[in-house]
Image (cartoon, rainbow, N blue to C red):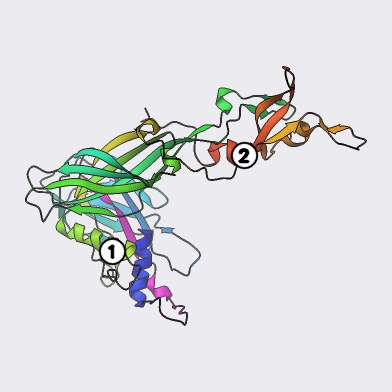
Amino acid sequence: MRRAKGIILLIAGGLMSFSGCKKPYAPSIGASNSNYLVVEGTINSGADSTLIKLSRTVSLSGKISSAPELNAVVTVESDQNNIYVIPETGKGWYAAPALGLDNTHKYRLRIKTSGGKEYLSDMEAVKPTPPIDSIGYTIQAKGLNIYANTHDPANNTRYYRWDYTETWQFHSLHQSNFISNGEEIVLRTPEQQIYDCFNSDTSSSIIVGSSAKLSQDIIYQAPITQIVNTSEKLETKYSILIKQYALTKEAFDFWQNLQKNSEKLGSIFDAQPTNLNGNIHCTTNPAEPVIGYISITNPQQKRVFITDTQLPITFSPAYPYQCEQDTFLFCKIIPQSTLGCINQVQADLIPPGSSTIPTSQLFAPGSPTVIGYLGTSVECTDCTIRGTKKQPDFWR
């Protein structure tokens, strides 16, 4: 939703720029154009949790990038006056386990802020989401295109939105089998291994699709995301969890407009900014804009795994750092020096907090005698600076 914040400020300021202008224009953005409430989330009518995120728009010229709305009272109300509390969990998030909603009734979200303002979404009927039929991918010269397939045999859905969470396994460029204990170099224990790690990310783009112009409610190969063939995500094993949401026509229009406003404004030939008419309103100040659209549905999800063995050998993940291994000897001869030799291992590898990590032993030619170690930087050996060693529970 952060893109939406910038777009709202852009619209409010009435700004437009053309690449042909020779004189730079530094727009003045008034403080009155910020601090609008942003509501993200879906009222889950199924067996999963309801998650709502509240934040405030921030000025483009300001120093902060986000402003969570804290200490609000968030509830879901039915058209039968049943109330379900969504407790605060921190950092602008409000969450509750399965609400057990009756699909034959309508629901809305009520928000009371600590500042005394109140916000209400429109009463909406439950819009059931059909299952995701399959997730697939096509291999292109430059990487993978991941897509989803779904359909509604009753032809009642027609409008869809997707988001996703990616998780991938990767490793450091060089494996370190040794570690300093502050006095000497010793073998790493299994708990001290820093070669294999996991990382994850969530979608930041808006992904919508519609079958409204088709005779049947079928979505075939809806594009979800692309992964370039040099991405570290494809190094070992990759997994994507896709969530699918059924939308009303009004919700679809909101998300499509938000997509156009936030992702497709690059030139005068692109779609121009439009008003974002959501279904959330400030009851204490009806003139105050509110950003967001609350849908009531039972999101469906599906996960797939892709391993490196399923991909072309031409896919070559690029390591994010320049890495070289150096030699560190117990006795490096210093020509024409009274010292004779210096102990590089003692000087560079053993001190606590050293930025150089030993990777493997060096042996004297034709001898089992260890004369030193190869070593390289932390960035090239320690995967935990970019991920975690803890394997996700769903990993297989």
Q: Determine crowd level at label 2: few under 14, some 14-19, many 20+ residues with C-alpha closer than 10 A.
A: some
Q: What amino acid type is highlighted by mark number 2?
A: Val
Q: Quadrant of the C terminus?
A: top left
Task: Say if the magenta span includes residue 38.
Answer: yes
Q: Secondary structure at mark 1?
A: helix
Residue at 57% over, 31% down: 175
> Which circle marks residue 286 in the picture?
none
Labels 1 and 2: the sequence-earlier one: 1
Residue indicated by mark 1: 260
Which image quadrant for residue 194? top right
Would residue 192 be found to the left or right of residue 330 on screen?
A: left
Q: Determine crowd level at label 1: few under 14, some 14-19, many 20+ residues with C-alpha closer than 10 A.
A: some
Residue indicated by mark 2: 378
Residue at 41% over, 35% down: 313
Residue at 34% over, 74% down: 12
The answer to which of 335 and 275 lies nearer the viewer is 335
The answer to which of 366 and 69 lies nearer the viewer is 366
Q: Quadrant of the N terminus?
A: bottom left
Alpha carbon separation for disc pair 1 and 2: 42 Å
Residue 20 picture location, percent across and down: 40, 79
The part of the chain drawn in magenta is 20-47
Q: What amino acid type is highlighted by mark number 1?
A: Lys
Would residue 177 be found to the left or right of residue 30 on screen?
A: right
Residue 55 picture location, percent across and down: 38, 58
Residue 252 picture location, percent across and down: 20, 57
In the figure, 127 relative to 360: above or below?
Answer: below
Can residue 2 be seen in this snapshot? yes
Which image quadrant for residue 206? bottom left
